[in-house]
Amino acid sequence: MSRIEHTQCDGSWLNLRWSDGAEQTLFATWLRDNAQTPDARNPANGQRLIDVSDVPEATAFQAASVAADGALDVTFAPDGYRSAYPAEWLRAFLGDAAQTPARTLWAASHTIVARTYDEATADPAALADWLRAVARDGIALLRGVPTESEAVFRVAGLFGYVRETNYGKLFDVRSVADPTNLAFTSQGLMVHTDNPYRNPVPGLQLLHCLQSDAEGGTSVFVDGFQAAARLKREAPDAFETLSSVWVPFRFRDGEADLQSRSPIICVDDGGAPTAIRYNNRSVAPLDPGEDVEAFYTAYRKFSDLLRDPAGEATIRLGPGDCIVFDNERVLHGRKAFKQASRWLQGCYADKDSLLSKLRILDAETNR
């Protein structure tokens, strides 16, 4: 690992030079606010024990040097407060300090990563590889899950907790009489994300196949981030519209009336997509104001891209297959099927627990 070779203080700023030639500039108040001492950080969980108001407003550097163990040893003015900072901790803030796997955008040629349930439950490395695929690609498959009712909960338990909604902890996907949702029919479904009318939207969806004797019913998945990137290249004005116009979503039945507003393409401070909200069944009427023409032009362009077979990854789930996908990135749908025994059970979960489990597994592997 690269080490700190040189330090230079200049009032409120500290310049570091690393052995690989990299340079880093640190602000005194930031470093003091992130002090690593027991009175500033809980040693057990790393949580901060001070507030920014506890840091002197005129904080500056009094001295800085490299300790024998390679850590940065800092003394602050005006009060002489001292803290050491491990080199690996500082290095994490140099360049890309991302804490999640880099995204891989994909289209129809994508092969969905698959592991077996026995591998994931017996081998932490296999479980980590599978979770990493969900984080990186937004989707992964687990084969050989017991074909028992509620076995999908066991899959969710590999990394986190079930998110309960008005549908309950568990929902059955099969055709029923008088359905409250088109998912509970034998009709084909346009690709969509689930529950855009919620705040927050469920981050992950799990679908476990228990029976599959019906003709048809092939599952269709589309990488919404790939489609958004294509929209940005081909029609930047449309991308700007869908990432700035707030759209109302609504679901209601006899027991619930759920409403939320969001852009169809949510972006971060750098303009990169962070979530897709697309569900033609749940879009409520848009305010017919001055943005409505531009919105419908952009909305149609995005819909056309989502329907393009070049972006569709398809799979026919068989008994024991459990597909897990990012509900804020990967759109899902299905082809129509003939009435027969087709039974899937699903549940929702949150992405933070999956990412947390992945970090823990990776840390254990690197010890």
Image (cartoon, rainbow, N blue to C red):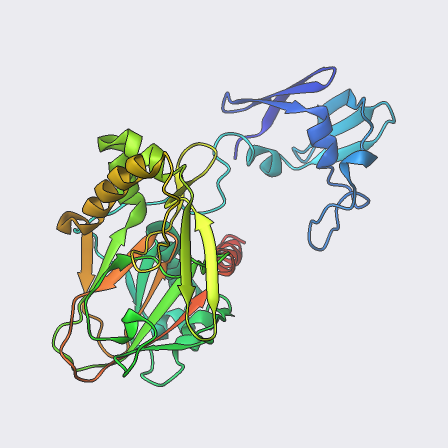
Residue 290 is situated, as x and y percent measured from the top left of the image, at 36, 34
Assign the C terminus to one quadrant of the image.
bottom right
Residue farthest to the top, as pictured: 10
The correct choice, above or below, for 165 with respect to 1 in the image is below
Outermost residue, front side:
288
Q: Is residue 297 left or right of residue 285?
A: left
| Vertical order, 70 against 334 (above or below) | above
Q: Quadrant of residue 226?
A: top left
Q: Is residue 102 visible?
A: no
**On the picture, is 334 further left or further right than 204?**
left
**Picture quadrant where residue 271 is located:** top left
Residue 278 visible in the current orientation: yes
Q: Where residue 142 appears, x then y in whole percent?
A: 32, 69
Residue sitting nearer the eye, 60 or 125: 60
Identify the residue shown where x is 47% and y is 66%. 257
The residue lying toward the viewer, choosing from 315 and 3, is 315
Residue placed furthest toward the right: 79
Q: Is residue 115 above or below residue 59?
A: below
Image coordinates for residue 316, horizontal then vertical, percent: 18, 69
Name the spot of residue 225 as percent of width and height, x first: 32, 45
The answer to which image quadrant residue 240 occupies is top left
